[in-house]
Image (cartoon, grey):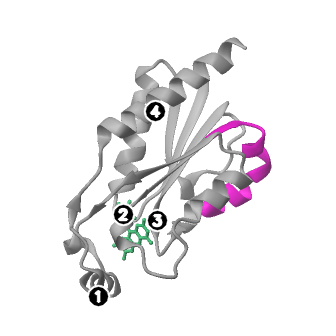
Amino acid sequence: MKVLVAVGSKYGSTREVARAIAETLETQGFEVDFSDASDVRTVAPYDAVVLGSAVYGGLWRRDASAMAKEHKTDLLARAVWTFSVGMETVVVEGQPKDEAYGISDRIGAREHERFSGAIDSEKLNIGERALIRALDPPLGDFRDFGAVRSWAEGIAAQLAELAVS
Ligand SMILES: Cc1cc2nc3c(=O)[nH]c(=O)nc-3n(C[C@H](O)[C@H](O)[C@H](O)COP(=O)(O)O)c2cc1C
């Protein structure tokens, strides 16, 4: 079975989460392609797609949400899982929590999972730094790669079942 893992990431922490998912699926014996969502031209060659994104201001990165929109019909015809990487401590009052729940419904995702992310204040632009200063969340790397790999193992188990049915 051929699987595409595609990701929208600004500063790289979500890309590393997606890589861990891709590597776990490979270890479980699947043929996996890994790509930034902005580079995906078609999902036709794949039996399954795992699509994820970092969340900024309650929204997915544009390349990830655009991929979901552009390939909606093909995604609806495939086994799809979605994930978001974000920080509960950076959610601004009045903003949507995470638009990914709506996106995953629209493309028929079997599951949507949220993972904690990472903030490196050195990398942020001026506006982002001002927001982070105002919200004053704990900074650092809160990613749990054990949780990420175990979610990917769950996907592998479901794919194995699909392969025999
Ligand atoms: C300016 C800014 C805004 C953010 N907004 C949200 C948000 O609305 N919701 C959320 O869950 N996480 C939010 N986050 C946390 C990021 O999603 C998290 O840091 C993620 O790991 C970033 O992924 P990336 O390194 O792949 O870009 C925000 C982070 C920053 C720096």
Are discs 4 and 2 less than 8 Å apart at CB? Answer: no
**At 42% across and 45% down in the image, what residue appears?**
18
Q: Nearer the viewer, mark 3 or mark 2?
A: 2
Q: Mark 3 or 1 closer to N-term?
A: 3
**At 46% across and 33% down in the image, what residue appears?**
152
Q: Is mark 3 within 8 Å of ligand 1?
A: yes
Are discs 3 and 1 less than 8 Å apart at CB? Answer: no
Q: Is residue 55 left or right of residue 134?
A: right
Quarter location, residue 140: bottom left
Instruction: Return the residue at label 1.
Output: 130
Q: Is mark 2 within 8 Å of ligand 1?
A: yes
Q: Mark 1 or 2 closer to N-term?
A: 2
Kindly identify which numbered label has been placed on residue 87. 2
Residue type marked 1: Ala
Instruction: Return the residue at label 3.
Output: 55
Total marks drawn? Answer: 4
Q: Secondary structure at mark 1?
A: helix
**At 27% across and 83% down in the image, what residue appears?**
129
Q: CA distance from mark 3 to mark 2?
A: 8 Å
Density class for disc 1 (Cα within 10 Å; few <14, some 14-19, many ≥20) is: few
Q: Mark 3 or 2 closer to N-term?
A: 3
Instruction: Return the residue at label 4.
Output: 152
Q: Mark 4 or 2 closer to N-term?
A: 2
Q: Is residue 45 above or below residue 113?
A: above
Which quadrant contains ligand 1? bottom left
**At 30% across and 81% down in the image, what residue appears?**
135
Residue 93 in percent (x, y) is at 45, 81
Density class for disc 4 (Cα within 10 Å; few <14, some 14-19, many ≥20) is: many
Q: Secondary structure at mark 4?
A: helix
Q: Which residues are magenta?
A: 65-80
Residue nearest the observer in this picture, 43 or 131:
131
Q: Which quarter of the rendering shows the C terminus?
A: top right
